[in-house]
Amino acid sequence: MRIKYDGVDLNEQFECFVVDRPLPEFRASGTPVNGVDGEIFENATYGTRQITIAVYAIDKTQRGLQWAARTLMGIIKTHEEKQLVIGDERDFNGNQLYRKVVPIGVPEFTPYVHAGRFLLRFKQFDPFLQGKDRVERLRTDQLLAINTGGNVEAWPVITATPTSNTFTLQKLGGEHITFKGGIAGKKLTINMRRQIVKVEPDITTGEGLQLGSRFFSIEGAVGITANCPAEIAWTERWL
């Protein structure tokens, strides 16, 4: 199985196998209310994911095992979030990209040390897998049908250059986002997840950018319209 961590291909020195990669914990919370059975639901979120990988050193001599241990220590010495890529034949996209992954502890020798077997444990702080990068383009007042992909919601980035001082993007079914101000002829970049809007060149004093409605995600089959040409980019997300 192909394994890469922080761009380093472990298969150059090891045979790699995934031992465990369970789904992240699903957490739902609520508030008890006197006189009411159960609780009042508040929200539901996904927790972290832990991944365990077994690697077998290709060179099983004593010197080879020492070198393998040093190599693994060098690979996972980071204390920053990195990307872990797992490729296998069962995957829908050829590879599975895990973001925000940090190693836990140090490479662990197992009872199979004579076979050059080490265990690597990782913790993924972003519980979702990153799938394909997708881009769609909208024409003015066109109803664009999108199949979002993935199996959880995605957060698009919208790019548009309005021809008037109002820009509206609407999702079929009601949700929409509207900007008003001195934006005619200027490039808008709207990051739905981060809830940030960038205007290039900057609007001047008195042109004031006003936001109507709210930022939204997309999931499954979605219809989108806009009052000027726009580009919608997003990355599929999978559990």
Image (cartoon, rainbow, N blue to C red):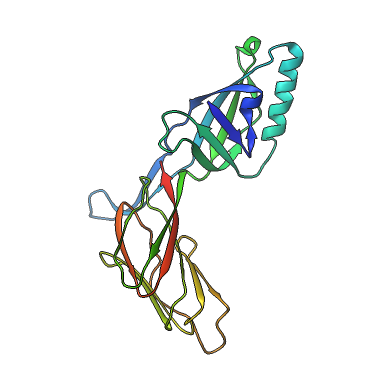
The answer to which of 194 and 106 lies nearer the viewer is 194
Q: Quadrant of residue 224?
A: bottom left
Residue shown at 27% from the left, 67% from the top: 174
The answer to which of 226 and 52 lies nearer the viewer is 226
Q: Percent position (x, y) of residue 36? A: 23, 54
**Height in image: 17 above or below 48?**
above
Residue shown at 39% from the left, 42% from the top: 26
Q: Percent position (x, y) of residue 227? A: 35, 75
Find the residue positioned furthest to the bottom. Answer: 206
Residue 32 in view: no
Q: Percent position (x, y) of residue 139? A: 36, 69
Q: Quadrant of residue 233?
A: bottom left
Find the residue positioned furthest to the right. Answer: 63
* Horizontal relation, residue 71 to residue 126: left or right: right
* Horizontal relation, residue 61 to residue 84: left or right: right
The answer to which of 188 and 122 lies nearer the viewer is 188
Q: Percent position (x, y) of residue 14? A: 63, 22
Residue 36 in view: yes
Quadrant that contains the C terminus = top left
Residue shown at 53% from the left, 90% from the top: 206
The answer to which of 48 and 190 lies nearer the viewer is 190
Q: Give the total of numbered labels.
A: 0
**Height in image: 218 above or below 111?**
below
